[in-house]
Image (tube, helix red, strand yellow):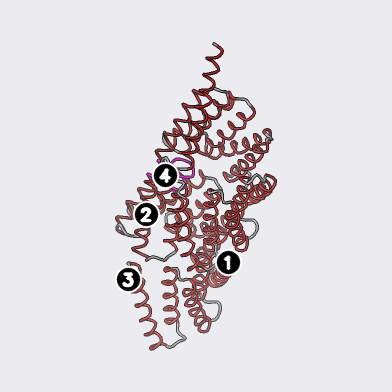
Amino acid sequence: MKEYLVQYGKALSYYSMVLRQSLLLYGAESDWTATSYNNIGSVYDDQGDYAKALEYHEKALTILKTIFDESHPDVATTYDNIGFVYNNGQGDYDKALEYYEKALTIRKNVFGESHPDVAASYNNIGSVYDNQGDYGMALEYYEKALIIRKAILGDNHPHVALSYNNIGYIYDDQGDYDKALEYHEKALTIRKNVFGECHPDVAVSYNNIGSVCYKQGNYSKALEYFEKAETILQIVFGESHPKVATSYNNMGFVYKIQGDYDKALEHFEKALTIRKTFFGESHPEIAESYNNIGFVYKSQGNYDKALEYYKHALTIRKTFFGENHPKIAESYNNIGSVYQSQGDYDKALEYYNKDLTITKAILGENHPNVAISYNNIGFVYKSQGNYDKALEYYEKALTIRKVILGKSHPKMATSYNNIGSVYARKGDYDKALEYYENALTIQKTVFGENHPDVASSYNNIGSVYAREGDYDKALKCIDKALTIQKSILGDSHPDVALSYKNFGSVYADQSDYVKALEYFNKALFIQESLYGPENTQTIRIQNKIAEIQAKLKEQENEQKTEE
């Protein structure tokens, strides 16, 4: 029997026994009985059985409202429990806000403005706004919680650390990584002072700092923090615990972006093994692991495997969440991305539109996830050569991002790059350069000079100069990209191979076929090392090399004829 079944089975047996005793001793309408219903609801929540969780929390609520009236702290706690299920389980954020605000109203009436439970309510409401992508409101509520906690608990308390943590998440979502680090490090300092070095909350802070370093492109630092977290969690919980699985997941993402797909798979599969041991075959966290493994296979060009894992994830998520949930939308998005990579654009559009429909229904028209959906649909239209449609969707994404994220967010740079790529395809090189340079300006402001996204923009700008026939400028831009990529990602990364291909293309355009072959062969070496000789991209490079070799031979023959 799986560990989680044993643990949750024991918990359910115990709480059910307590419930029977409560009913026998105190009757159906007692606070003891209500507490038992709440406890059973919390177990179902942990198991991912949100319908059952709601059922038991609502039973508790009915009893408590009968005993105490509407304005009792225990009623507020149960409103919180129900809000938690809607927020974290079912993705029904309007319902979550409704219940969290009911809890807040009761607590303010009973305790006044300045009480830890009021701070907890502000925190909960902030988390809903965070999920809705309303980062300004989320920050406002998290800061209200922080002010109360510091006033009552002092500067050096775990709940203050939690508030710093949450504020750090918001700055992370907003792309202000320096601010995010500042708040996560404040949380870490408190946690180390209070708990010492070896505590799960310290591990949470290390994971959070690692995530910010990852987004900043500082992958060695990210790994360092993720490994610190893993060490602590293994000491505290042992090797087979879901929190250890989370650290393996985090490390897997670093290895994946570094192009070390074997290492990435190894870590994602470790996470999956732990989760299966703990949760069984069907749980939202199992779905997440299938998703991550699918992500690696897609990056390797193994699209059948990627689809297999993405569809496993979708099946599990539908079982737990039903048809209309952000996680279902995410799965549709992932499946669409595989069909896109395979060139099956009708299928890709079908899945991207499913994603968009759910996302808009749950999150509204103006949410960062809606922008992602528009982006993906735009990409398909661009691939089909429907540039007007592509621009329409890319600009929709840009508009949302400007409103929600502000003008200097990394996602704005993504949108500028996408729009620039359409203008480049249309042959409007001035417009393409304008958008690519806008992207580069944002990326250098956010990340500094040394980041993979900055390198990508240099490559994009270089490609425009090459199309304009300004080969010196093109080579300078590609060289900047390559230098950054090799310093961050190492010599054998897919992005390095891309820059080598770009160098090769420029030299081929200049009829310098010897140089072109040199760079395409470098790209081929990396490509074959990572993906093998049968990969689609590998075959394309092989074909390009054959084409250039033929042109070189033709050139040599012409030179001999002239002699």
Picture coordinates of residue 147, whole percent (x, y): 52, 57
Element at label 1 = helix
Between marks 1 and 3 in the image, the one whose residue lies nearer the viewer: 3
Asked if one can make out residue 154 in the rendered structure from this viewpoint, the answer is: no
Q: Are marks 2 and 3 in contact (CB under 8 Å)?
A: no
Q: Which residue is mark 2?
A: 269
First in sequence: mark 4 vs mark 2: 4
Predominant SS of the magenta segment: helix
Between marks 2 and 1 in the image, the one whose residue lies nearer the viewer: 2
Element at label 4 = helix
Q: Work out which quarter of the rendered image holds the N terminus and state it.
A: bottom left
Is 69 drawn above or below residue 164 in the view shown? Answer: below
Q: Which residue is mark 1?
A: 97
Q: Are marks 4 and 2 in contact (CB under 8 Å)?
A: no
Between marks 3 and 4 in the image, the one whose residue lies nearer the viewer: 3
Q: Which residue is mark 4?
A: 222
**Crowd band around label 3 with a 10 angstrom C-alpha radius: few (<14), some (14–19), many (20+):** few
Q: CA distance from mark 3 to mark 4?
A: 35 Å
Between marks 4 and 1 in the image, the one whose residue lies nearer the viewer: 4
What is the three-letter code of the residue carrying label 2? Answer: Glu
**Crowd band around label 1 with a 10 angstrom C-alpha radius: few (<14), some (14–19), many (20+):** many
